[in-house]
Amino acid sequence: MSFQLQDKKAVVTGGSSGIGLATVELLVAEGACVAWCGRDEQRLNESKQQILARYPNAKVFTAVCNVLDKADVQKFADLVQKQFGGVDILINNAGQGRVSDFENTADEDWIKEVELKYFSVLHPIRAFLPALKQSNSGSITNVNSLLALQPEPHMIATSSARAALLNLTHSLAHEFSQYNIRVNSILLGMVESAQWKRRFENRSDLHQTWEEWIGNIAKKRGIPMARLGKPEEPARALVFLASPLASYTTGSAIDVSGGFNKHL
Ligand code: NDP
């Protein structure tokens, strides 16, 4: 069974690395036309070259865009409309987490985190909504974290902002049902990506290899599957929710955490 994505038009924010790039690749492999953005031009170009090297006939489009800059996002949406003539799928993936507890999170950091978690989703939805309304299979899928249900004290601001995003996803699912646009999310545990590579580079024990380091994290955190996820694992959940295969699913969240979810 295929994801039924041939010639669908998809947008992935933060598609130049990690989970976003794995999602772009799966969408392209399934025959979708895919546009993605990121802030760093070089990383974005490299991701495009990587996709085109594997799928030379892929219909792809990239643009430098900071999802926190409303005008930038509108420009991106206008360019996508020009390139593809519409949009069926929006995947809001761009972002990162903040590691800090209450005592070392300054007020400005709270504001930045709340801005990132809300507006990395609100700006793209506002900009792409007119196109999504025209689609006969419109969907919005937000990358969220298990922190939304299971807060971690060392990520206090991210956890509470993630809970807000889960709540917002439900409201949008209800409001957009009238347009036949489905809105869902995935709840991530820990997934190997550039964020984790950056943390690895700053590890205290420089003798530890990547495999040892992530293996220790999985063990210490008690992840039942004893490993971190690979980017293609959340990508498959995202593409399923975004696709017509999930046609009767809205306001829902798929857990992708290797069993780390203690709420089941
Ligand atoms: P990566 O750092 O590998 O990828 C993040 C992507 O988002 C990059 O393409 C980055 O490109 C882009 N990006 C970041 N900020 C912006 C912005 N303001 N505007 C446009 N693009 C942006 O991380 P992951 O793949 O791990 O993260 C993907 C999503 O998953 C994030 O929202 C993250 O918070 C979430 N997540 C990840 C977890 C994990 O364990 N990996 C756990 C829980 C949630 P550039 O920097 O060039 O802009």
Image: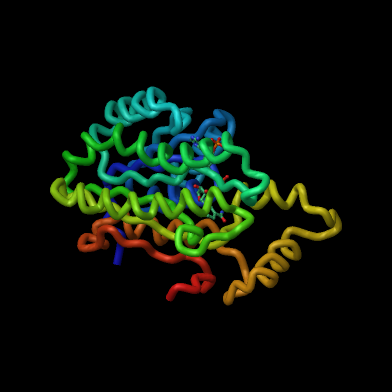
Farthest residue toward the left? Answer: 178
Residue 123 found in image quarter: top left
- Please report the residue visible at 39 percent of the width from the left and 27 percent of the height from the top: 70
In-front residue for pair 158/54? 158
- Please report the residue visible at 74 percent of the width from the left and 62 percent of the height from the top: 213
Total residue callouts:
0
Q: Is residue 252 above or below residue 121?
A: below
- Position of residue 132 measured from the top left corner of the image (x, y, whole percent): 23, 40
Residue 53 seen by the camera: yes
Q: Is 163 on the left or on the right of 248, as rendered?
A: right
In-front residue for pair 171/50? 171
Q: Is 202 on the left or on the right of 174, as rendered?
A: right
Q: In this view, does 161 lie above or below 216?
A: above
- Position of residue 120 measured from the top left corner of the image (x, y, whole percent): 43, 39
- Please report the residue visible at 21 percent of the width from the left and 34 percent of the height from the top: 130
Residue 49 seen by the camera: no
- Position of residue 18 measured from the top left corner of the image (x, y, whole percent): 55, 49
Residue 1 found in image quarter: bottom left
- Please report the residue visible at 16 percent of the width from the left and 39 percent of the height from the top: 134
Q: Quadrant of the C terminus?
A: bottom left
- Position of residue 127 measured from the top left corner of the image (x, y, whole percent): 30, 32
